[in-house]
Image (cartoon, rainbow, N blue to C red):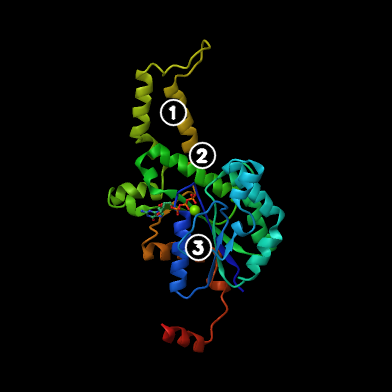
Amino acid sequence: MSRVGVLALGPAGAGKSTFCNSLVGHMQSNKRSCCLINLDPAAEQTEYEFSIDIRDLISLKDVMEELQLGPNGGLIYCFEFLLENLDWLDEEIGDFEEDYLIIDCPGQIELYTHIPILPRIIEHLRDNLNYSLCITYLMESSFIIDNLKFLSGTLSAMSTMILLELPHINLLSKFDLVKNEYSRNYIRKFLQPDPMSLMSTSSVSSNSLSEMIEKGEGEEKGKGKGKYNYNEKFERLNLAIGNLIEDFGMVQFLPLECKDKDSIANILSYVDDITQWAENQEPKEPKDEIEDVTED
Ligand SMILES: Nc1nc2c(ncn2[C@@H]2O[C@H](COP(=O)(O)OP(=O)(O)OP(=O)(O)O)[C@@H](O)[C@H]2O)c(=O)[nH]1
Ligand SMILES: [Mg+2]
């Protein structure tokens, strides 16, 4: 029996919900059964209905009103409540045992960077319910406009890989917005990033540095000898970050265009490989295959 799931993670607005919906559309048109799960208590309505929705368990609006919490505190409360009521999730998932889980997550990365809420839910799905899971981490393609911004996004993708310890695919989302603006060679540098070369060609960093120096902000204030100026400090910090990403050596990206069927099919084929979805399928009787074809 296949127990397979994919989670969509990444910063707010990166395109997670749109991606999850595109996956559902693609699977449905290929007669694959899937279950769309919403783990975002502040989610808005999406194209496909959620089969399982955290808002049926707890509402962020109610939490914020009753406990007088802000949106982030409220979100954390909702997840802590979910953790205390994992049997609710188990029951809901029980109705979709044979289905591919597509899990849409909130954009607040503190749910796994600061407090281990998402890791505990993942652990439950993987170890207690025996799901083979894959993370898709979305980062907006517009980050490639600025090399250093891109590297900071890469660092965030990398920390997710390390913290969640699951098979992981990084995606450059909304690729349609940049693919005609830049040459293939230029874009390739970001799909398989070489941090040190991206750093050495960062025009934005040197511009902002010269601006700082012109404004007289270059020197660190205070304390006598052995001080660095910002320029040196900034370069040393960048170098350390670049080395970290390079040493890790496992951050690559696939382009994602949610409206492009080939792009979705390509990403799903990677997820299928990683989760070994095909291997877990029950062999079909030839009769079933013929029925499937004639139904089209
Ligand atoms: N051009 C383009 N726009 C996209 C694509 N995917 C998503 N968007 C747009 O990006 C915006 C945010 O998309 P969402 O799917 O809501 O992003 P999200 O990551 O779920 O956002 P949060 O749930 O708030 O964290 C919407 O306006 C989408 O229409 C894409 O592939 N191409
Ligand atoms: Mg969303």
Q: Please count the marks in the image.
A: 3
Residue closer to the observer: 88 or 234: 88
| Distance from Cα at disc 1 to Cα at disc 3 | 37 Å
Mark 1 / mark 2, whichever is N-terminal: 1
Three-letter amino acid code at the position of disc 2: Leu
Residue at left offset 55%, top offset 49% = 161
Q: Indicate the secondary structure of the residue bearing disc 1.
A: helix
Q: Which mark is residue 235?
A: 1
The x, y position of residue 260, in whole percent, is: 36, 62
Residue at left offset 38%, top offset 65% = 261
Q: Residues within 10 Å of mark 3 (few under 14, many from 20)?
A: many
Q: Residues within 10 Å of mark 2 (few under 14, many from 20)?
A: some
Tell me if the residue at label 1 has its CB under 8 Å from ligand 1. Answer: no
**Compared to 31, does 101 lie above or below?**
above
The x, y position of residue 107, in whole percent, is: 52, 48
Three-letter amino acid code at the position of disc 3: Val
**Compared to 164, does 234 lie above or below?**
above
Q: Which residue is mark 2?
A: 244
Mark 1 / mark 3, whichever is N-terminal: 1
Three-letter amino acid code at the position of disc 1: Glu
Q: Residues within 10 Å of mark 1 (few under 14, many from 20)?
A: some
Q: Which mark is residue 271?
A: 3
